[in-house]
Amino acid sequence: MSQLIEEEYHKSESGSTGGVCELCYEGELHGGLNAFKFDCGHHLYCNDCVKESFTDYINRSEMSKLVCFTVKCGTKVRQEQVEELFVGDKEMVQKFIKFTNKDKLESDPLVRYCPKKDCGGIVRGKTL
């Protein structure tokens, strides 16, 4: 790690109100006004980097990637954080909600989709 990056890393680790984005290492975070922070409290990221990454993940329905960028953390982003990040972009928020709900349904072993073409209905069984 270069000396400059290492200094900025330690600056953000210590909870500094300034520093640079841990993804792009550009742009002063101006006391957190342009910063995004996950609930875990790890590092600060600039809104532009987070928004760019999240837009890509949401458009590809890769909801499992909407987590803290810190290695091995895994803290998930909350819907409120997505709504705040995408203020004025209702389409992106609606996609987030749609794909998040779809992921929840698909991860439930008791949920099945209706086999009829163009139905889209779901059924939840009582047992496997």
Image (tube, grey):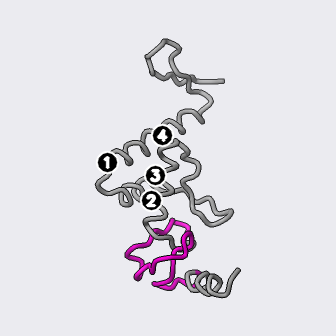
Segment tinted magenta in the rendering = 13-41
**Residue at the extreme left:** 88
The mark found on residue 51 in the picture is 2
Looking at numbered disc 4 in the image, what kind of residue is underneath it?
Phe
Is tag 2's residue or tag 1's residue first in the polypeptide sequence?
2
**Magenta segment, prevailing SS (helix, strand or loop):** loop
For the residue carrying disc 3, how many other residues have a C-alpha within 10 Å: few (<14), some (14-19), or many (20+)? some
Query: In front: 102, or 86?
Result: 86
Task: Return the x and y of residue 63 as percentages of the image width and height.
Answer: 54, 46
Does the residue at mark 2 contact the one at mark 4 (Cβ under 8 Å)? no
Query: CA gap, disc 2 to disc 1?
Result: 14 Å
Does the residue at mark 3 contact the one at mark 4 (Cβ under 8 Å)? no
The mark found on residue 55 in the picture is 3
Does the residue at mark 3 contact the one at mark 2 (Cβ under 8 Å)? yes
Looking at numbered disc 3 in the image, what kind of residue is underneath it?
Thr
- Which residue corresponds to the image point at 51% horizontal and 79% vertical from the top-left? 20
The mark found on residue 124 in the picture is none
Query: In front: 68, or 8?
Result: 8
For the residue carrying disc 4, how many other residues have a C-alpha within 10 Å: few (<14), some (14-19), or many (20+)? some
Q: For residue 14: magenta?
A: yes
Q: What residue is pinned by disc 4?
A: 99
For the residue carrying disc 2, how many other residues have a C-alpha within 10 Å: few (<14), some (14-19), or many (20+)? some
Looking at numbered disc 1 in the image, what kind of residue is underneath it?
Lys
Task: Name the front one of labels 3 and 4.
Answer: 3
Query: CA gap, disc 2 to disc 4?
Result: 17 Å
Q: Is residue 29 left or right of residue 4?
A: left
Task: Name the front one of labels 2 and 4.
Answer: 2
For the residue carrying disc 1, how many other residues have a C-alpha within 10 Å: few (<14), some (14-19), or many (20+)? few
Q: Using the rendered view, name the quadrant where residue 40 is placed.
A: bottom right
- Which residue corresponds to the image point at 70% horizontal and 80% vertical from the top-left? 1
Q: What residue is pinned by disc 1?
A: 90
